[in-house]
Image: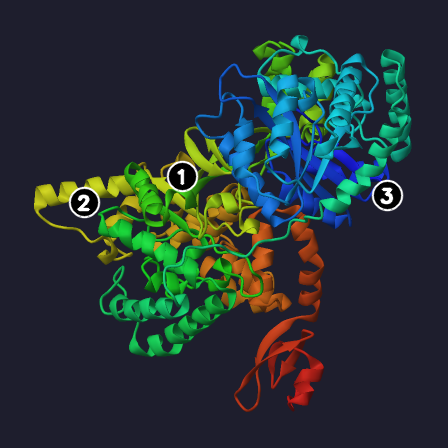
């Protein structure tokens, strides 16, 4: 492996500046023959986590940097230049978070984020960063910026200082290289050394057009406005880099009459020095939550005890558990959940969410009874986060929190849409505005948008892009362009008629297109967010630079604070009832089997009911009610089955037919009958997936949740990794049998035998060990 790193790579996270995806980085390293890739995004660190993880899988290292846009003063017309900063430790990364966040503030941002030289002096720390002078539009291209750089270096101690030499022999780079050499040799006291780097913006020569088109998409300009880049910005091997450096040095000699070959040679050696100095490597961060109580575990226990007394003293949805149930089922479940939360360190999270929900309710803001996996937590029920009794409805805690893995919890919270801003304002007032923000969305080009965007760049008429409607979906997931080309004649015809559009759309598919704002995600941290993220402004809102997939890796836990118009309807309806009938309705006191409420569903008069308003689900209601009146349990099952996957698989239709007695109820395996009996053998719920994995294949609760998550996310790669374990477990089998002494035991290695005349699925060795009589 070559010792020289591949420096100065930009990815598509630098919008419009590169067509390299993070997933391309291992191949780039292989092509360049190196084990280290230096990724330097423009005013962004958003690729840091994804790039680290992607390279680590290939046993490669990431060198992190940022290309900083600097202006002399915060003026709209101020000239900008670029320099590069590289963190050498954690403090260096935090300094970059602060600096980049400053660039998004209102008095700095002007179309793009920018910072001033004063910002650099005020926000950077000593001895935690290396600095270099940049490549495109570098500090060396302007005399005033060169003076400002010299002044900065008198204020901040950098661990290493480099002036960049770009191994390119064009007149532009020759002039910039000469400026850098002359400046560094006259400012010797600053201690700048040469560093040879070449920007890497695409994977190979065939990406040149796609690069220009991508820039046009980002800046909303037609392709005709862009010239093809004069230089080659594909990854270079060490040999190619050395040859390019020799050629660039020769160009300087030819143009300026001086030989600077030794400086280029030293600049190549300093590539490795930069890697050695910048030893920072990102690693997963511990959760960072506000401290609500000195001992969060004790405080959560206190709230649960209080909730145990109040929750079960009066009916909730017309149900009160018996004393025997409280002793045999509720208390053991509560002890297990509290022990798990204590072990994983999640008690503070529950206190945070409980505080928010209780405040909202105290202000007359309606909060949803509980949606998603949080409904499986008894602790959430007792602390007022949800109004769903998980034991009554057989919901699994392991679906919310995997006891085998440190996956941070994620509660989906619904609030009145007209008062959602009050909820956000409370969080900011309670914990500090600097510790609360939304979450960014990473928006990529899908198959359809790739064709439309590229077609627009080439001024393709709108009526000629109608072929995009023939790109199919599978369970709500769009087909790729390659898949669509295989199956749709209209797509094949489009590719034939517009080869340039098609070729570049295929190259840009999946690349970053823009940044957005998550509709509901909010993070609340126990420290200022700039300690762990860049705080950006998107659409007038403050958001962290990490999207929901990686924010947890920074220890920033996401709350889904969603505005739900249905809750506003509740509020309006209850106020009307109070006004007309002087009766205050308690929603939680209504029976789930209320005949008048169920009558509405039996007649499919559900146009204004959340998740039952669509025409397709109302047709299903009519089909189901035709056989016999609906129950609340039927509505729950139908709500779960009325989704693209179950509908496409015919599961909803099968449920309706089996319920009506028009189709035989069957089970994938006899031992699954207790799991699937209530849904007529149809696997309707994610909890059932978990139970099937446990009963049939011997998964632990945590392993079952991993499988459930893979299925729920339609993650083909993740499901493939679970397949062998599931199949092997099913072949070996795990079945609970009753022994002669009356006790039960889970046995492995399933086979069908008769035990005292009754067929059971048991393991021979286990049965013989306990003296069971087998009839083979």
Mark 2 touches mark 1? (CB < 8 Å) = no
| Residue neighbourhood size for the residue with mark 3, other residues' Cα within 10 Å, grouped as few (<14), some (14–19), many (≥20) | few
The residue under label 3 is: 3
Q: Name the residue under label 2.
A: 574
Circle nearer the N terminus (2, 1): 2
Q: What element carries label 2?
A: helix
Which image quarter is the C terminus in? bottom right
Q: Residues under labels 2 and 1: Cα distance?
A: 29 Å
Q: In this view, does 747 lie to the left or right of 194?
A: left
Cβ–Cβ under 8 Å for marks 3 and 2: no
Could you say where residue 28 lies in the image, as x and y percent from the top left?
79, 36
The numbered mark, 3 or 2, whose residue comes first in the sequence reads 3
Label 3 SS: loop
Q: In this view, does 311 lie above or below 46?
A: below
Please state the total of marks drawn on the protein image.
3
- Which quarter of the figure has residue 618? top left
Q: Where is residue 205 in the image (x, y as percent from the top left)?
A: 81, 23
Residue 702 image offset from top left, x and y in percent: 57, 64
- Judging by the rendered image, the residue that carries numbered circle 1 is 619
Q: Decide: marks 1, 3 in contact (CB < 8 A)? A: no
- Compute the Cα span from label 1 to label 3: 66 Å
Does dot 1 land on a helix, a strand or a loop? Answer: helix
Q: In which quarter of the image is the N terminus?
A: top right
**Label 2: few (<14), some (14–19) or many (≥20) C-alpha neighbours in 10 Å:** some
Foreground residue among 253 and 443: 253
Q: Can residue 437 be seen in this view?
A: yes
Task: Using a 10 Å C-alpha cutoff, classify the residue at mark 1 as few (fewer than 14 neighbours), some (14 to 19) or many (20 or more).
Answer: few
Camera-side residue of 302 and 241 = 241
Q: Quadrant of residue 757?
A: bottom right
Relative side of 85 to 243, left or right: left
State left or right for residue 287 relative to residue 502.
left
């Amino acid at each position: 492996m070559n010792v020289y790193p591949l420096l100065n790579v930009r990815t598509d996270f630098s919008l419009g500046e590169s067509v390299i995806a993070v997933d391309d980085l291992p191949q780039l390293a292989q092509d360049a023959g190196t084990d280290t890739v230096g990724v330097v995004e423009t005013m962004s660190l958003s690729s840091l986590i994804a790039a680290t993880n992607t390279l680590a899988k290939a046993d490669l290292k990431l060198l992190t940097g940022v290309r900083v846009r600097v202006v002399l003063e915060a003026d709209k017309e101020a000239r900008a230049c670029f320099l590069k900063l590289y963190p050498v430790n954690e403090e260096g990364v935090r300094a970059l978070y602060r600096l980049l966040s400053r660039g998004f503030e209102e008095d700095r941002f002007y179309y793009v984020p920018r910072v001033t030289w004063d910002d650099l002096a005020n926000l950077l720390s000593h001895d935690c960063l290396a600095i270099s002078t940049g490549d495109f539009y570098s500090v060396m291209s302007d005399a005033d910026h060169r003076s400002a750089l010299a002044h900065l270096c008198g204020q901040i101690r950098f661990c290493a200082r480099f002036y960049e030499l770009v191994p390119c022999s064009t007149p532009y780079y020759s002039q910039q290289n000469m400026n850098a050499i002359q400046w560094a040799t006259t400012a010797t006291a600053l201690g700048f050394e040469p560093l040879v780097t070449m920007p890497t913006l695409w994977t190979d020569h065939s990406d040149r057009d796609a690069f220009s088109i991508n820039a046009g998409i980002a800046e909303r300009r037609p392709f005709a406005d862009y010239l093809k880049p004069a230089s080659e910005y594909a990854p270079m091997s060490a040999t190619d880099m050395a040859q390019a450096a020799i050629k660039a040095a020769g160009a300087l000699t030819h143009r300026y009459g001086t030989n600077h070959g030794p400086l280029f040679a030293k600049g190549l050696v300093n590539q490795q020095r930069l890697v050695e100095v910048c030893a920072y490597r990102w690693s997963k961060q511990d959760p960072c939550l506000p401290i609500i109580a000195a001992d969060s575990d004790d405080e959560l226990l206190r709230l649960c005890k209080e909730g145990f007394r109040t929750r079960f003293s009066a009916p909730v949805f017309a149900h009160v558990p018996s004393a025997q149930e409280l002793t045999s089922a509720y208390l053991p479940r509560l002890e297990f959940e509290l022990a798990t939360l204590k072990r994983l360190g999640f008690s503070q999270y529950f206190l945070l969410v409980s505080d928010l929900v209780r405040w909202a309710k105290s202000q007359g803001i309606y909060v949803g009874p509980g949606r998603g996996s949080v409904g499986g937590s008894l602790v959430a029920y007792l602390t007022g986060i949800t109004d769903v009794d998980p034991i009554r409805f057989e919901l699994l805690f392991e679906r919310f929190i995997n006891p085998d893995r440190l996956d941070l919890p994620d509660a989906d919270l619904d609030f009145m849409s007209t008062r959602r801003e009050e909820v956000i304002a409370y969080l900011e007032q309670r914990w500090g505005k600097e510790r609360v923000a939304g979450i960014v969305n990473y928006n990529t080009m899908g198959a359809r948008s790739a064709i439309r965007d590229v077609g627009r760049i080439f001024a393709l008429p709108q009526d000629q892009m109608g072929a995009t409607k023939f790109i199919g979906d599978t369970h709500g997931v769009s087909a790729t362009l390659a898949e669509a080309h295989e199956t749709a004649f209209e797509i094949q015809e489009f590719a034939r008629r517009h080869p340039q559009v098609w070729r570049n759309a295929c190259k840009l598919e999946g690349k970053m297109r823009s940044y957005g704002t998550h509709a509901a995600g909010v993070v609340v941290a126990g420290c200022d967010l700039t300690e762990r993220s860049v705080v950006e402004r998107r659409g007038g809102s403050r958001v962290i630079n990490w999207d929901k997939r990686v924010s947890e890796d920074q220890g920033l836990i996401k709350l889904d604070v969603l505005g739900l118009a249905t809750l506003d309807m509740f509020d309006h309806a209850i106020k009307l009832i109070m006004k007309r009938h002087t009766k205050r309705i308690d929603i939680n006191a209504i029976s789930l089997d209320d005949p008048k409420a169920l009558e509405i569903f039996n007649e499919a008069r559900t146009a204004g009911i959340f998740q039952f308003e669509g025409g397709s689900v109302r047709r299903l209601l009519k089909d189901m009610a035709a056989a016999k009146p609906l129950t609340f349990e039927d509505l729950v099952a139908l709500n779960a089955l009325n989704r693209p996957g179950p509908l496409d698989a015919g599961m909803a239709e099968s449920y309706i037919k089996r319920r009506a007695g028009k189709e035989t109820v069957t089970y994938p395996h006899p031992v699954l009958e207790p799991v699937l009996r209530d849904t007529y053998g149809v696997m309707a719920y994610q909890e059932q997936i978990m139970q099937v994995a446990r009963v049939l294949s011997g998964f632990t609760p945590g392993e079952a949740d991993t499988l459930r998550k893979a299925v729920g996310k339609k993650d083909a790669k993740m499901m493939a990794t679970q397949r062998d374990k599931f199949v092997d477990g099913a072949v070996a089998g795990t079945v609970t049998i009753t022994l002669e002494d009356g006790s039960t035991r889970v046995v492995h290695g399933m086979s069908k035998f008769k035990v005292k005349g009754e067929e059971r699925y048991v393991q021979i060795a286990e049965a013989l060990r306990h003296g069971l009589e087998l009839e083979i």
